[in-house]
Image: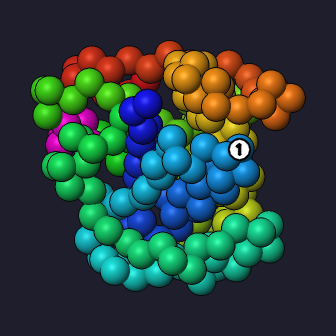
């Protein structure tokens, strides 16, 4: 079976995308899919390369049981378009940057993370870096909800993942949107 790979992208790779990385990895691990789904995160800006996630991000994540201690910021690279089936942006600015980097040969899923969410109030994961502490909790709330939808989407499009689970262990997850992968599509 081919592995499925997911890359979460924000600006500096110290708040939103590492949160998504940690949450989604935790869900993948708890579902016994860590051998089938590869998870990573990166940023489109290079200000924090090699840094651990923001302390406020890590603290809020730790309160909910997510460990970010091994994560370090890195920059999105051209090679990522060859390695990742899903490249998921936290906001439209980062999605635009990814579209500009995207080679014509990329046939994976490129889109916004909250397109996998059932909530309709937010379309982008807001950057909490310059805001108050409650912004980090909001990011985590949005990421947890969208991660559930993304995992459901991947399962729905990869039936071989479901074959590796016991029937009683399959979570009841909701459907998620189909993504537009046309190069001229600025967003989903």
Magenta-drawn stretch, dominant element (helix, strand or loop) = helix
Q: Quadrant of residue 124?
A: top right
Horizontal side of residue 105 vs 36, given as left or right: left
Residue 11 visible in this rendered orientation of the protein: no
Q: Residue at x 80, y 67 (%)?
A: 64
Residue 4 occupies quadrant: top left
Question: Seen from this angle, which residue lies furthest left?
Answer: 104
Asked if the magenta segment contains residue 100, the reply would be yes
Q: Residue at x 60, y 43 (%)?
A: 33
Q: Specify start and end residues of the magenta stretch as a single range.
A: 98-102
Residue 50 placement (x, y as % from top left): 34, 80
The relative height of residue 23 versus residue 124 in the rendered view (above or below) is: below
Compared across the picture, whether 92 is left or right of 108 comes to: right
- Residue drawn at x 27%, y 18% is 182
Which residue shows up at 69% across the image and 38% down it?
A: 148
Indicate the quadrant where residue 117 lies: top right
Disc 1 target residue = 31
């Amino acid at each position: 079976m081919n592995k499925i790979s997911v890359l979460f992208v924000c600006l500096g790779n110290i708040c939103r995308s590492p949160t998504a990385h940690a949450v989604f990895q935790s869900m993948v691990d708890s579902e016994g899919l860590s051998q089938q789904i590869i998870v990573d995160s990166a940023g489109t800006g290079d200000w924090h390369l090699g840094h651990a996630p923001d302390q406020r991000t890590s603290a809020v994540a730790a309160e909910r049981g997510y460990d970010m201690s091994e994560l370090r910021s890195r920059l999105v690279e051209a090679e990522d378009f060859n390695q990742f089936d899903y490249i998921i942006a936290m906001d439209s600015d980062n999605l635009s940057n990814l579209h500009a980097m995207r080679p014509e040969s990329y046939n994976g899923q490129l889109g916004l993370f909250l397109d996998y969410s059932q909530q309709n109030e937010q379309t982008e994961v807001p950057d909490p870096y310059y805001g108050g502490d409650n912004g980090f909790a909001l990011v985590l709330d949005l990421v947890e909800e969208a991660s559930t939808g993304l995992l459901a989407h991947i399962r729905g499009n990869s039936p071989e993942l479901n074959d590796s689970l016991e029937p009683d262990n399959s979570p009841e997850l909701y459907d998620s949107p189909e993504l537009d992968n046309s190069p001229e599509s600025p967003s989903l």
